[in-house]
Image (spheres, helix red, strand yellow):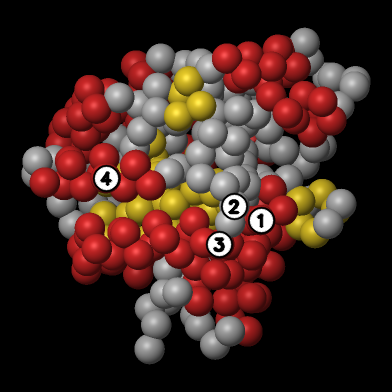
């Protein structure tokens, strides 16, 4: 029988902007309610970014994270994953700052540099709530999201080894799997580890199922039984790719960070709505959804009692 499917929900992210959806969580209270709602709907891991409550811009400040991390922990049992992706344009020190203060069970870690193009989204809107939004999107036409071997090692040592935090290794392309294998060979990563394969970001692997199948094949060759994999795809490809991952024995990620929609032309009203949809699909396929306790055991996490919030 297949293992229960771990659902990760990324509730706000650092890509979409306030103009794009009135349902995007911005304030600490909105992020808290979104996270708790997603957990109640069946997500066992909650992937978190922070935003400036005044204007919705991605925010790396630990004090902003600390306005919602403790309350989410108090109100649900989900694994709390603090992103180190931050917002595009942040330095590695800024991106790691909140996680180093919070010492979470999990953090995301991008496994390679890439052109991260979200500038086409600027063409879809005319009236912006905040001046920073179109500027933020447009700058990615001449932008490389830097994740060098040096910065990856820095995160593995300073957050992983020092805090016992384990990672959601974000792989946007085939080469990122080989970067991960390099650190595995060096002993800086040990199993079981969690690989998040990402599709549909301009500059990374396209949302073509052939790309997923090939990356899955290579990951199996590189990592064997040492890893768990999950899949996310941007926008309209979110649910089809998550479904395919579950059918291949993998795990899934949904949330308003990855797609603002619940169906064609229909904005999702909450993160919980997306979690409920993928949970329904999983269960109708005859599979079950993992509990937070099962996710902790399978990913060898340190436990919610060993964080700094």
Find disc 4 in the rendering and name its residue: 178
Circle 4 SS class: helix
**On screen, 298 above or below 200?**
below
Q: In this view, does 293 lie to the left or right of 54?
A: left
In this orientation, does residue 37 appear? Answer: no
Sort mark 3 into few (<14), some (14-19) or many (20+) by Cα contacts within 10 Å: some
Residue at x-position 84% and y-position 30% = 124
Q: Do the residues labelled 2 and 1 touch (CB within 8 Å)?
A: yes
Residue 234 spot, x, y in % from top left? 63, 47
Q: 307 or 55, which is in the foreground? A: 55
Find residue 17 and report its image quarter.
top right
Residue at x-position 34% and y-position 42% = 175
Instruction: Point out which mark residue 102 bears.
Output: none
Q: 233 or 207, which is in the foreground? A: 207
Circle 1 SS class: helix
For the image, the number of numbered tags is 4
Tell me which numbered mark, 4 or 3, is placed earlier along the sequence. 4
Find residue 21 and report its image quarter.
top right
Find disc 3 in the rendering and name its residue: 209
Residue at x-position 17% and y-position 31% = 157
Q: Nearer the viewer, mark 4 or mark 1?
A: 4
């Amino acid at each position: 029988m297949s293992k229960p499917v771990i659902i990760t929900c990324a509730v706000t992210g650092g890509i979409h902007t306030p103009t794009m959806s009135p349902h995007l969580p911005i304030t600490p209270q909105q992020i808290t309610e979104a996270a708790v709602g997603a957990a109640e709907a069946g997500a066992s891991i909650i992937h978190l970014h922070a935003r400036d409550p005044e204007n919705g811009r991605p925010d790396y400040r630990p004090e902003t994270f600390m306005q919602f991390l403790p309350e989410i922990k108090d109100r649900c049992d989900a694994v709390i994953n603090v992103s180190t992706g931050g917002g595009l344009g942040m330095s590695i020190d800024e991106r790691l700052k909140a996680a180093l203060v919070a010492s979470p069970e999990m953090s995301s870690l991008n496994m390679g540099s890439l052109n991260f193009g979200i500038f086409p989204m600027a063409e879809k809107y005319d009236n912006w709530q905040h001046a920073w939004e179109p500027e933020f999107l447009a700058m990615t036409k001449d932008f490389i999201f830097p994740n060098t071997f040096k910065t990856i090692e820095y995160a593995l040592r300073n957050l992983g080894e020092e805090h016992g935090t384990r990672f959601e290794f974000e792989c946007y392309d085939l080469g990122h799997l080989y970067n991960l294998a390099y650190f595995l060979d060096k002993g800086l990563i040990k199993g079981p580890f969690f690989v998040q394969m990402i599709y549909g970001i301009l500059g990374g692997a396209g949302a073509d199922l052939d790309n997923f199948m090939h990356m899955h094949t290579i990951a199996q060759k590189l990592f064997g039984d040492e890893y768990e994999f999950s899949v996310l795809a941007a926008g309209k490809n979110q649910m089809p790719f998550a479904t395919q991952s579950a059918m291949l024995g993998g795990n899934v990620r949904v949330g308003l960070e990855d797609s603002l929609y619940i169906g064609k032309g229909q904005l999702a009203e909450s993160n919980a709505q997306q979690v409920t949809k993928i949970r329904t699909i999983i269960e109708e396929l005859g599979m079950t959804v993992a509990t937070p306790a099962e996710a902790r055991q399978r990913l060898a996490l340190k436990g919610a009692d060993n964080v700094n919030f």
